[in-house]
């Protein structure tokens, strides 16, 4: 190979066009490129956030000039439309309710620290990661190039240059390659014509043709492929855009760590040069920016280990990820990957995470727990209203929301918070409701979205769980699985939450039979998970107290009906206790009553989650009375249409539950007995049941 044909990234690459731009065209030397930071900030029109370059003329002028209400000055009573509200420009200012996370992100952006965010989906984790990219300095951004290595083709050379320069360098190389190819072709033609001319003059035409063909083939075959010597732009950035934000969630090793494509030809002149087959991974594309990885535990241990190395070193060579591919022979020089890592997930993600990676993030960064509700204060309401305006503006297609629509959305946010005096921060779901409501308004050709559109949207945009729950209710009524009238012994209508925002009636059956073993067993079926199983054990204590019977000589069977996805949590405790007491005492239970509540071993009814959804499910099923823990009463924000369908009775003790739900022949006698048992001193109680402690071997 001709010396001139080698492309050495350290010394050549000077193209006249590029050189004209203040020396920018010079090939980067390693010393220059690795540490160089572009200080000259070529301000363009796009640097001004108030100026939109593309399509700015599309914005109606009067709207653009309308004076806007600042978020802190919003007064809902006098607000006519969400379009009156000023939406913050910067992403970080658009995040609501996550003040701690916002503060951490701001700090971490300055100090270049990694962050781990744990919390419920849709609370703004990836939004914060994008916001961080906006906060990082643009000047540090780089392009990364990969060059062929004439010494060792399997070890391509890596160079980094300031953002935007990469394209210029590649263009310069292409132009240079084209020029060389043209010169070479001209030389070949001259040589061939020379030989042919000589052959004609000397009358040796055949020899001339053979000679010319031979020379043509030899030169053609041996000449270096000029195109093949052109470097490849591995990572490209634009000097004026924000630092890169790359989402590496669920990436396979190649997409995350980079890869070298397989070459089916490998030799013989048809092969693709190694450097041309190198592909950057998410860790390289996020160089000088943010790498966001959600559900980090889903990455393989191999990927997590390599991610850790990349974090520590700030550079990571690219090699073929598949062992059997020709790409595995190639390994580039180390490629810069100085990214800030934002790892996200729920608590399980932390458990499944590589311990060393977790410790690295903890040691060199912050950990943040994302809030999923915020207090329903006037201050936060203003932020929430701004969020509605923001979502409408970001969507760009839906009509603005009037006051009634905003109020309806806010009502839904209170309901979804499942917590008294709070607004939900699962804002992706709320964003979805906003968009569907807007679509309803568009469908009506309305220029404004109203509460009526929101209500219609809620009906249409039901979650899959909600739709399944409705279907289950319909079917279980058809097959008499859900009974909502009359009485039955050992059968209670419990209530469960399905998914995040849907409830379901959960029938529970109990039966007590004489035991065959030395001590009685409590056997519960219905795919109960750990906490649900433990709650059954705790119920045993209540049974002893409220039946006053020696349950050592009986087996107690408890069956949860239709729980194909298992039962989590202990909110069925009151239902289980009631069903078993009913079975042991042979007292019927009202079937028009449904109940939910956790139980202390002393018989106090403790709070549960999802009270609103459970009550709504009961109402939909035709239940007339719902018993809930007193401490949950303020959490209940059921929709208007269900309000008159059910009576909600708050309770604090299991005695109150039994008084409402059980229908003994002689109610007074039964209540007297209950009171007596409930108020019994421990010593009297132990004596009365002969120190019986039931084992729970069936659990
Ligand atoms: N705290 C918040 N403030 C403003 N908007 C939010 C907030 N949280 C979520 N959103 C809205 O919801 C959308 C989705 O949120 P995002 O993707 O950031 O959630 P996430 O926590 O990363 O969820 P996941 O873990 O499922 O990816 C955002 O684009 C934004 O419109």
Image: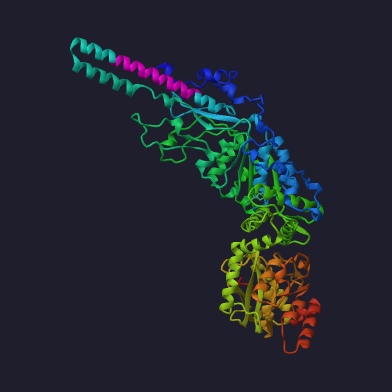
Q: Is residue 612 visible?
A: yes
Q: Where is residue 55 in the image (x, y as percent from the top left)?
A: 62, 39
Q: Is residue 26 visible?
A: no
Q: In which quarter of the image is residue 50?
A: top right
In magenta, the rendered stretch is 172-192
Point out the image quarter for the N terminus: top left
In the rendered image, the residue lying farthest to the bottom is 665
Residue drawn at the location 75% of the way across and 48% of the way down: 84
Q: Is residue 283 above or below residue 377?
A: above
Q: Is residue 332 above or below residue 424?
A: above
Q: In which quarter of the image is residue 449?
A: bottom right
Q: Position of residue 223 (x, y in %)?
A: 36, 21
Colour pattern: rainbow
Q: Position of residue 511 (x, y in %)?
A: 62, 81
442 vs 521, nearest the viewer? 442
Q: Where is residue 533 in the image (x, y as percent from the top left)?
A: 64, 68
């Amino acid at each position: 190979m001709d010396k001139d044909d080698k492309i050495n990234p350290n010394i050549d690459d000077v193209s006249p066009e590029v050189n004209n731009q203040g020396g920018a065209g010079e090939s980067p030397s390693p010393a220059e490129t690795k540490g160089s930071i572009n200080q000259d900030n070529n301000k363009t029109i796009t640097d001004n956030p108030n100026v939109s370059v593309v399509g700015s003329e599309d914005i109606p002028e009067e709207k653009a000039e309308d004076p806007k209400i600042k978020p802190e000055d919003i007064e809902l009573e006098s607000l006519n439309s969400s379009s009156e509200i000023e939406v913050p420009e910067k992403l970080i200012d658009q995040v609501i309710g996550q003040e701690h996370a916002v503060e951490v992100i701001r700090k971490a952006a300055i100090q270049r620290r990694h962050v781990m965010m744990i919390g419920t989906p849709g609370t703004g984790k990836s939004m914060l990661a994008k916001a961080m990219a906006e906060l990082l300095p643009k000047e540090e951004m780089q392009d990364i190039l990969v060059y062929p290595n004439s010494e060792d083709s399997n070890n391509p050379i890596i160079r980094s240059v300031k953002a935007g320069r990469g394209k210029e360098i590649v263009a310069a190389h292409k132009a240079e390659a084209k020029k060389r190819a043209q010169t070479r072709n001209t030389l070949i033609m001259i040589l061939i014509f020379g030989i042919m001319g000589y052959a004609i003059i000397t009358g040796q035409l055949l020899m001339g043709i053979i000679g010319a063909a031979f020379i043509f083939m030899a030169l053609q075959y041996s000449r270096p492929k000029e195109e093949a010597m052109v470097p490849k732009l591995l990572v490209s950035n634009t000097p004026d855009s924000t630092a890169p934000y790359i989402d590496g969630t669920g990436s396979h090793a190649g997409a995350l760590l980079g890869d070298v494509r397989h070459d089916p030809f490998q030799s013989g002149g048809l092969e693709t040069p190694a450097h041309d087959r190198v592909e950057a991974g998410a860790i390289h594309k996020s160089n000088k920016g943010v790498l966001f990885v959600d559900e980090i535990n889903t990455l393989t241990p191999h990927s997590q280990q390599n991610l850790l190395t990349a974090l520590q070193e700030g550079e990571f060579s690219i090699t073929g990820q598949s062992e059997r591919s020709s790409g595995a022979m190639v390994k580039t020089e180390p490629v810069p990957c100085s990214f800030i890592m934002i790892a996200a997930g729920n608590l399980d993600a932390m458990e499944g995470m590589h311990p060393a990676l977790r410790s690295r993030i903890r040691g060199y960064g912050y950990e943040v727990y994302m809030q999923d509700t915020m207090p329903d204060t006037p201050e936060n309401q203003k932020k929430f209203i701004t969020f509605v305006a923001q979502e409408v503006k970001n969507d760009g297609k839906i009509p603005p929301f009037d006051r009634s629509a905003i109020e309806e959305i806010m009502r839904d946010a209170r309901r979804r918070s499942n917590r008294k005096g709070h607004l939900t921060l699962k804002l992706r779901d709320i964003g979805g409701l906003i968009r569907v409501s807007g679509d309803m308004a568009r469908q009506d050709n309305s220029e404004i979205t109203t509460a009526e559109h929101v209500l219609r949207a809620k009906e249409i945009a039901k979650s899959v769980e909600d739709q399944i729950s409705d279907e289950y209710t319909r079917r279980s009524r058809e097959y008499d699985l859900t009974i909502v009238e009359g009485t039955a012994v050992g059968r209670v209508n419990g209530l469960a939450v399905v998914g995040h925002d849907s409830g379901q009636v959960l029938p529970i059956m109990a039966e007590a039979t004489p035991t065959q073993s030395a001590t009685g067993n409590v056997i519960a079926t219905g795919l109960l998970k750990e906490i649900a199983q433990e709650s059954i054990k705790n119920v045993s204590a209540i049974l002893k107290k409220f039946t006053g019977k020696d349950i050592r000589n009986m087996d107690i069977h408890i069956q949860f009906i239709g729980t194909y996805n298992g039962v989590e949590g202990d909110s069925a405790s009151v239902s289980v206790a009631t069903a078993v007491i009913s079975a042991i005492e042979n007292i019927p239970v009202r079937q028009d009553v449904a109940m939910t509540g956790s139980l202390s071993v002393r018989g106090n009814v403790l709070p549960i989650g999802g009270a609103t959804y459970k009550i709504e499910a009961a109402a939909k099923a035709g239940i007339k009375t719902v018993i809930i823990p007193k401490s949950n009463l303020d959490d209940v924000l059921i929709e208007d249409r269900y309000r008159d369908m059910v009576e909600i009775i708050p309770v604090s003790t299991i005695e109150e539950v039994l008084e409402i739900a059980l229908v003994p022949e002689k109610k007074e006698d039964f209540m007297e007995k209950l009171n007596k048992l409930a108020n019994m001193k421990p010593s009297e109680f132990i004596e009365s049941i002969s120190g019986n402690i039931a084992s729970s071997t069936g659990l």
